[in-house]
Image (cartoon, rainbow, N blue to C red):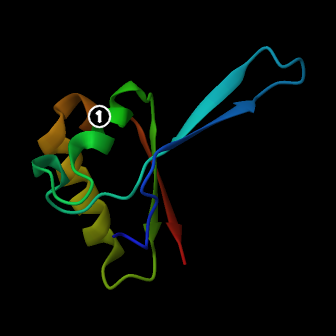
Amino acid sequence: DYPFTSVIPNLGVASVDTDGESSLVLADIPGLLEGAHDGVGMGDAFLRHIERCRCLLHVVNGCSKDPLYDLRAINIELELFSKQVAAKPQVILFNK
């Protein structure tokens, strides 16, 4: 049980122009735990979903004890899972 995160990936589609011809698909992927690449938590089942993403947007808890450590842990998991996934462009958001 992981009450702090999604447990099911969700997809959403947003129109990005006024004529409705262009759209953007967003994937809400559950948070990663250290060791996810080895099956910890939801494991690599959710990591596989991000292989098709062009860009990764991370929402990091800015109030955690060490948010930069948390971000590094995410990137380590990505690198251990796939060097191609880890090389994707990333946008980092810190929330409170």
The structure residue drawn at horizontal position 25% and vertical position 70%, both measured from the top left corner, is: 69
Q: Secondary structure at mark 1?
A: helix
Q: Is residue 52 at least partly visible in the picture?
A: yes
User: Which quadrant of the view contains residue 45?
Assistant: top left
Whether residue 23 is situated above or below residue 67 in the rendered picture: above
The location of residue 89, given as percent across then percent down, is 40, 36
Q: Quadrant of the C terminus?
A: bottom right
Q: Quadrant of the N terminus?
A: bottom left
Query: Disc count in the image?
Result: 1
Classed neighbour count for the residue bearing mark 1: other residues with Cα under 10 Å, few (<14), some (14–19), many (≥20) = some
Compared across the picture, whether 40 is left or right of 33 comes to left
Whether residue 14 is situated above or below residue 72 in the rendered picture: above
User: Which quadrant of the view contains residue 17?
Assistant: top right
Compared across the picture, whether 79 is left or right of 42 comes to left
The location of residue 21, given as percent across then percent down, is 79, 14
Residue furthest toward the top? 21
Whether residue 30 is situated above or below residue 87 in the rendered picture: below
Residue furthest toward the front? 1
The location of residue 78, given as percent across then percent down, is 23, 45
Whether residue 50 is situated above or below residue 80 in the rendered picture: above
Q: Is residue 88 at least partly visible in the picture?
A: no
Which residue is nearer to you in this view: 85 or 31? Answer: 31
The location of residue 73, given as percent across then percent down, is 22, 61
User: Which quadrant of the view contains residue 53?
Assistant: top left
The structure residue drawn at horizontal position 43% and vertical position 48%, both measured from the top left corner, is: 29
- Residue hosting label 1: 48
Residue kind at label 1, given as amino acid type: Arg
Compared across the picture, whether 37 is left or right of 19 comes to left
